[in-house]
C-alpha cells in the first residue's frame, strides 16, 4: 500500500521530462509530414507510453515493497504502566515482525506511534508527549482498569488516535483472556479431568477489600450458607510466585470471580485463572449476556441466575453432591484452549501490529469518556 502510493503520482506525471522526450517530441515532428505518419506516430506514442506505464512502476514497486507484515514500525512506550520498569520484549515472540519498541524519548520525532498508559498521565500527572506531533504519528490510549478506577478521562478528549483496552469495541482489542476453539482435546480439558479429586468447595482471592464494593456485600450474604476459603490481603496469605492462584484453585470446585466494579466487557484475570485451574467461576461483573460474548453459557454461574443468594448457595451445594450435573459445567472445556495475554509484552506487540494495519489512515478518538463509560 505504502509503496504504491509513492510510485503512483511520480510515474504518471505528464510533465516528466524523459516522458516528454521519448513520447511526445517524435510524434510532433512526424505530424508535419502527412496524416498517415501522424496516425503511425500516435500509435507509436501510445504503445511507448503503455510500455512505460506498465513496465516502470512494476520495477519500482518490486524494489520498494516489503511484505505488508514486515513494513518497519517504531512504537514508543511513553511510560511504564504503574511506573514498573520491565525489559521490552522482542515481538518475534508474538509472531510480529519488523517492530521496534523503544522507551527512549529521543525517538519521538521518528516514532510511528506513541503508546500512552492512562494511569501515569492521570494519577501521576506524567507529561504528555510534546505538540505538535509528527504528521502521521498516532497516539494510542491504553487502559486496563475499569471506568470506576479510571480518573480524569475528560482531560484527554480529542487527543488520541486509537484506543486499546479490554473492551471489544476498542480500536485495539486485547482482553484479559480468551478462548480459542480447538478440534482436539487439550490442556483445558485435562485440567478438569485431573485424577486428583477436588476436595475443596469454594475459594475467593481478594487483595483490595473495600466495603463499598458490591462483591463484599455479596460475600457477606453467601457466607451465611456455605463455607468460603478467603485468600489474599483479607484472608489466608497467598503463597508467593507466579501462577500460585491457578495452582491453589486446582483443589477447588468453585471460585468467586467477583469484579471490583461492574462495567461493559470488564472481565479480568479472576475469571480466566479459575478456568485455567478447572474451577467453575461464580461471576459478579457485567450481565450474563455480556459474559456470553466471551464464554459458553454453561462455563460460568452468574450471581444474577438466581433470585436470591440463598438459591445460588443451594445450587452450588447440589452440584457438589452430584458429579453428573457438575459435568454440565465442565464438558465444554474439551473444545477450547485458553490464552491469557502477558502484561505488558503482548500488549506492546499487539499495538505495534495494529499501527501497521492502520498506516495511512487518519483516526481520532472524539468522545473518550462517553465511550469508555458506556
Ligand atoms: C536515546 O537515544 C539517543 C539518540 O539515539 C542516545 O544518544 C541516548 O543515549 C539514548 N538514551 C538511552 C537511555 O538509551
Ligand atoms: C481499592 O478499591 C478502592 C475503592 O474502589 C479504590 O479507590 C482503590 O483505588 C483500590 N485500590 C487498588 C490498589 O486497586
Ligand atoms: C515470574 O515470571 C516472570 C516472567 O515470566 C519471571 O521473570 C520471574 O522470574 C518469575 N518469578 C518467579 C518467582 O518465578
Ligand atoms: C491524531 O489525532 C490528532 C488529534 O485529534 C489529529 O490532529 C491528528 O491528525 C491525528 N493523526 C492521525 C494520523 O490520525
Image (cartoon, rainbow, N blue to C red):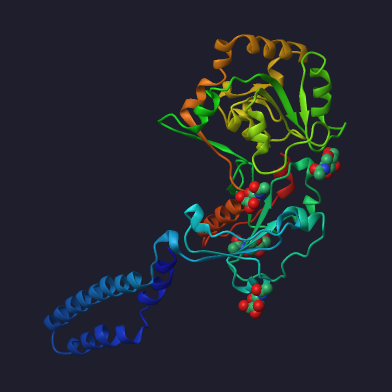
Percent across and percent down for residue 227 are 77, 18
* Front-lying residue, 331 or 363: 331
* Front-lying residue, 338 or 198: 198
Question: Compared with residue 72, is residue 370 higher up or lower down, i.e. above or below?
Answer: above
Residue appearing at x 58%, y 41% in the figure? 340
| Residue 201 in view in this figure | yes
Q: Quadrant of the N terminus?
A: bottom left
Residue 25 lies left or right of residue 176; in this view the side is left
Question: Compared with residue 361, is residue 255 higher up or lower down, i.e. above or below?
Answer: above
Percent across and percent down for residue 321 are 64, 9
Question: Compared with residue 4, is residue 320 higher up or lower down, i.e. above or below?
Answer: above
User: Which quadrant of the view contains residue 232?
Assistant: top right
* Front-lying residue, 170 or 195: 195
| Residue 163 in view in this figure | no
Q: Which quadrant of the picture is home to ligand 1?
A: bottom right
Q: Quadrant of the C terminus?
A: top right
User: Which quadrant of the view contains residue 138?
Assistant: bottom right
Residue 61 lies left or right of residue 144; in this view the side is left
User: Which quadrant of the view contains residue 3?
Assistant: bottom left
Q: How many marks?
A: 0
Residue 8 lies left or right of residue 266; in this view the side is left
Percent across and percent down for residue 46 are 22, 75
Residue appearing at x 59%, y 27% in the figure? 278
Residue appearing at x 87%, y 32% in the figure? 212
Percent across and percent down for residue 180 are 49, 36
Tell which residue pokes out farthest to the right in this image. 211
* Front-lying residue, 95 or 20: 95
Amino acid at each position: 500500500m505504502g509503496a504504491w502510493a509513492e510510485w503512483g503520482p511520480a510515474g504518471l506525471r505528464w510533465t516528466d521530462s524523459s516522458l516528454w522526450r521519448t513520447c511526445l517530441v517524435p510524434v510532433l515532428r512526424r505530424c508535419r509530414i502527412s496524416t498517415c505518419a501522424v496516425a503511425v506516430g500516435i500509435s507509436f506514442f501510445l504503445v511507448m507510453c503503455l510500455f512505460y506505464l506498465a513496465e516502470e512502476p512494476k520495477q519500482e514497486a518490486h524494489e520498494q515493497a516489503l511484505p505488508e507484515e514486515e513494513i518497519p514500525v517504531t512504537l514508543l512506550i511513553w511510560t511504564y504502566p504503574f511506573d514498573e520498569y520491565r525489559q521490552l520484549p522482542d515481538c518475534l515472540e508474538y509472531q510480529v515482525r519488523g517492530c521496534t519498541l523503544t522507551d527512549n524519548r529521543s525517538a519521538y520525532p521518528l516514532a510511528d506511534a506513541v503508546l500512552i498508559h492512562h494511569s501515569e498521565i492521570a494519577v501521576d500527572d506524567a507529561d504528555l508527549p510534546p505538540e505538535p506531533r509528527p504528521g502521521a504519528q498516532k497516539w494510542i490510549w491504553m487502559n486496563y482498569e475499569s471506568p470506576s478506577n479510571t480518573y480524569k478521562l475528560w482531560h484527554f478528549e480529542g487527543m488520541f488516535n486509537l484506543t486499546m483496552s479490554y473492551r471489544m469495541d476498542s480500536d485495539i482489542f486485547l482482553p484479559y483472556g480468551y478462548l480459542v476453539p480447538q478440534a482436539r482435546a487439550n490442556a483445558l480439558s485435562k485440567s478438569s479431568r485431573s485424577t486428583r479429586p477436588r476436595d475443596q468447595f469454594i475459594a475467593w482471592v481478594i487483595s483490595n477489600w473495600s466495603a463499598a464494593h458490591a462483591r463484599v456485600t455479596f460475600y457477606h450474604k453467601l457466607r451465611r450458607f456455605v463455607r468460603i476459603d478467603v485468600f489474599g490481603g483479607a484472608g489466608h496469605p497467598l503463597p508467593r510466585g507466579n501462577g500460585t492462584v491457578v495452582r491453589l484453585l486446582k483443589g477447588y470446585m468453585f471460585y468467586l470471580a467477583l469484579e471490583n466494579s461492574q462495567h461493559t466487557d470488564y472481565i479480568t484475570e479472576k475469571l480466566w485463572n479459575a478456568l485455567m485451574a478447572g474451577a467453575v467461576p461464580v461471576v459478579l461483573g457485567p450481565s450474563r449476556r455480556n459474559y456470553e460474548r466471551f464464554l459458553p453459557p454453561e462455563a460460568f454461574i452468574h450471581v444474577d441466575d438466581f433470585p436470591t443468594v440463598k438459591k445460588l448457595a443451594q445450587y452450588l451445594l447440589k452440584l457438589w453432591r452430584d458429579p453428573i450435573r457438575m459435568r454440565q459445567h465442565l464438558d465444554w472445556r474439551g473444545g477450547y484452549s485458553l490464552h491469557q495475554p502477558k502484561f505488558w509484552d503482548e500488549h506492546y506487540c499487539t499495538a505495534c501490529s495494529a499501527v501497521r494495519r492502520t498506516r495511512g489512515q487518519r483516526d481520532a478518538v472524539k468522545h473518550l469518556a462517553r465511550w469508555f463509560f458506556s
